Amino acid sequence: MSVMKDIAELLFIVLLVMAFIQLCVYWLEYRRLAFYRRKESAITKLPVSIIICARNEKENLQKHLPSILEQDYPDFEVIVVNDCSWDETDLVLMDIAKKYAKLKIVTIKEQEKYTHGKKFAITLGIKAASHENLLFTDADCYAANIQWLFLMQRNFSNQHEFVLGYGPYEKEKTLLNKLIRFDTFFIAIQYLSASLSGAAYMGVGRNLGYKKSVFFRNKGFAKHNHILSGDDDLFVNENANATNTTIEIDKDSFTYSIPPSTFSKWIGQKKRHLTTAKYYKGRHKASLIIKNATLFVYYLLLIPLFILQYDWRILVSLHILMLLVKFPIVYRIANRFKEIDLAWLFPVLEFIHTLLQPLFYLANLLTKQKTWK
């Protein structure tokens, strides 16, 4: 009995350490995003090129592309790279081009002896761009507002070469939808807060901006062209730094997309995203491991401590304290991101989301991605 008590005491000490690290992460790093205020400065409306890669996206292009082409901005072009589509995407684009002069189409024909990923399509899109300032989104995304382009591009300056935005999913009433949105929300908290802390490590291709010159100065995707994924996060990871990167979180700057409809589709999507994390810089990987592993260990230890009959009042009090201290940060960010329902469900969603993480990593280890879409 004494041995079991000693084990329980040791586990509780580890639990306290995990809790302390988590609270430090929230109030030393995530707090930056919760209380972020953009510094006002003179804004020059420079011309912008928007680049979208599409493969078999005829329905999404018909539905969402007008929201990009109808932005309230004086000088911009939209380049859609039709990457080896076989679903009449070309006909849809030609039809849309008749209505919108700002649309430029780049077509890639499929070749039997040569295969390529999304990075090749993006590179062609960048080469076709007429302007220095580039914005990226996906064919299945639509702009929250006609001011999306203005709000994103206003962050470019002589200093800022990267602009990191937020790309949430549409809301539905299912638990799966809330989990998917919470996952996107939580990832955004991490990469946007890291950028504000001077340690930008990723961005998402659904809503991202960078300069054409930074792309060619760093030889594009040459360093990781052999990796199928990573056209957004790996490029940011390699080239963004504390001085050349900023964020945009105005609610009208978001780009929305339709979430995966089933758990298996979500798993497939997560596998594609996780393939690149191991290629991040060492300090970024270490930071993510600390943030995610300490939270997982915290929840993992609660269960055996209850089994070992550690004083439940202490455990419950500690967990309630954790939630109460973290909640103001989560609530403030969720309110800014128009995800307030996720804040009220935070205790449940964080627990489920944390325990699902090993499943995502295991699924990624067991399968290999063969195409970008």
Image (cartoon, rainbow, N blue to C red):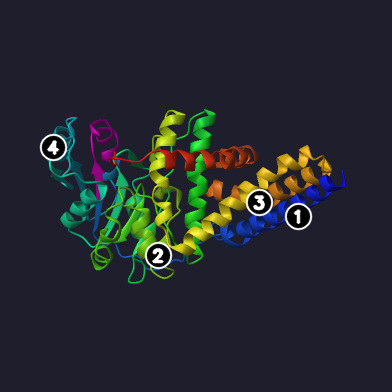
Q: Quadrant of residue 28?
A: bottom right
Q: Earlier in the sequence, mark 3 or mark 1?
A: 1
Q: Nearer the viewer, residue 169 or 359?
A: 359
In 3D space, how far apart are the residues under numbered discs 2 and 3 (Cα atoms)?
Answer: 27 Å
Q: Nearer the viewer, residue 142 or 99?
A: 142
Q: State left or right for residue 228 relative to residue 260.
A: left
Q: Earlier in the sequence, mark 4 or mark 1?
A: 1
What kind of element bears circle 3?
Answer: helix
Which contiguous range is marked in magenta?
A: 51-66
Instruction: Give the x, y percent position of residue 88.
Output: 16, 30
Residue 259 part of the magenta segment: no
Task: Identify the mark at residue 13; answer none if there is no mark.
Answer: 1
Task: Identify the mark at residue 74; answer none if there is no mark.
Answer: none
Q: Are marks 2 and 3 in contact (CB under 8 Å)?
A: no
Q: Amino acid at mark 4?
A: Met
Q: Amino acid at mark 3?
A: Lys
In 3D space, how far apart are the residues under numbered discs 4 and 3 (Cα atoms)?
Answer: 50 Å
In 3D space, how far apart are the residues under numbered discs 4 and 1 (Cα atoms)?
Answer: 64 Å
Q: Amino acid at mark 2?
A: Thr
Q: Earlier in the sequence, mark 4 or mark 2?
A: 4
Residue labelled with disc 4: 94
Instruction: Give the x, y percent position of residue 292.
Output: 56, 51
Q: Earlier in the sequence, mark 2 or mark 1?
A: 1
Comparing marks 3 and 1, which lies closer to the viewer? 1
Comparing marks 2 and 1, which lies closer to the viewer? 1
Residue labelled with disc 2: 245
Task: Identify the mark at residue 326; answer none if there is no mark.
Answer: 3
Q: Amino acid at mark 1?
A: Ile
Residue drawn 26% across and 30% down? 59
Q: Is residue 155 visible?
A: no
Residue 57 part of the magenta segment: yes
Residue drawn 66% across and 44% down? 299
